[in-house]
């Protein structure tokens, strides 16, 4: 099964500096808007947010467990190379 979030989606995320909303601007490349869906944007953004939350040292055990569960579910939809890249980025 094809993954929802691919390296191409991550490349667009990077191109627009993490703000997919910028693709709606007049100056943005119209091909970019056609190459990504709102579901892809939402999945990637949610995963990045969960990665950031996982770095919080005083996160409750319940919330940490819930966070890990949500991340595992999202990882089923994200290409392994994207997961690896985002984890590397989150460590810096």
Image (cartoon, rainbow, N blue to C red):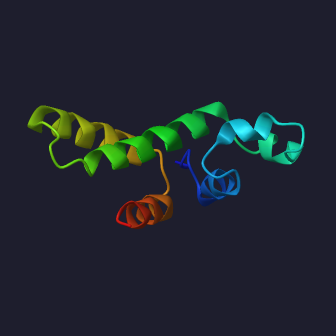
Q: Nearer the viewer, residue 8 or 89?
A: 89
Q: Which residue is pictured at 44% across the width and 47% down the height?
A: 48
Question: Which picture quadrant has residue 37?
Answer: top right
The reply, left or right, for residue 78 in relation to residue 24 is left
Vertical order, 55 against 81 (above or below): above
* Percent position of residue 80, x then y: 45, 61
Vertical order, 61 against 52 (above or below): above
Q: Which residue is pictured at 87% across the width and 47% down the height?
A: 29
Image quarter of the C terminus: bottom left
Residue, far left = 61
The reply, left or right, for residue 7 in relation to residue 76 is right
* Percent position of residue 26, x then y: 89, 37
Q: Which residue is pictured at 48% across the width and 50% down the height?
A: 78
Q: Is residue 28 visible in the rendered structure shown here?
A: yes
Question: Which picture quadrant has residue 22?
Answer: top right
Q: Is residue 76 visible in the rendered structure shown here?
A: no
Q: Which residue is pictured at 56% across the width and 44% down the height?
A: 4
* Percent position of residue 58, x then y: 14, 43
Vertical order, 41 against 14 (above or below): above
Q: Nearer the viewer, residue 71 or 20?
A: 20
* Percent position of residue 60, x then y: 12, 36
The reply, left or right, for residue 11 in relation to residue 46 is right
The reply, left or right, for residue 53 in relation to residue 79 is left
Count of marks placed on residues: 0
């Amino acid at each position: 099964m094809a993954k929802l979030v691919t390296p191409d989606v991550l490349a667009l995320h990077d191109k627009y500096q993490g703000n997919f909303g910028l693709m709606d601007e007049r100056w943005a490349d119209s091909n970019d808007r056609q190459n990504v869906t709102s579901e892809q944007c939402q999945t990637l953004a949610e995963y990045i947010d969960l990665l950031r939350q996982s770095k919080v040292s005083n996160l409750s055990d319940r919330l940490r467990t819930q966070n890990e569960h949500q991340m595992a579910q999202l990882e089923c939809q994200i290409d392994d190379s994207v997961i690896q890249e985002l984890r590397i980025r989150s460590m810096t």
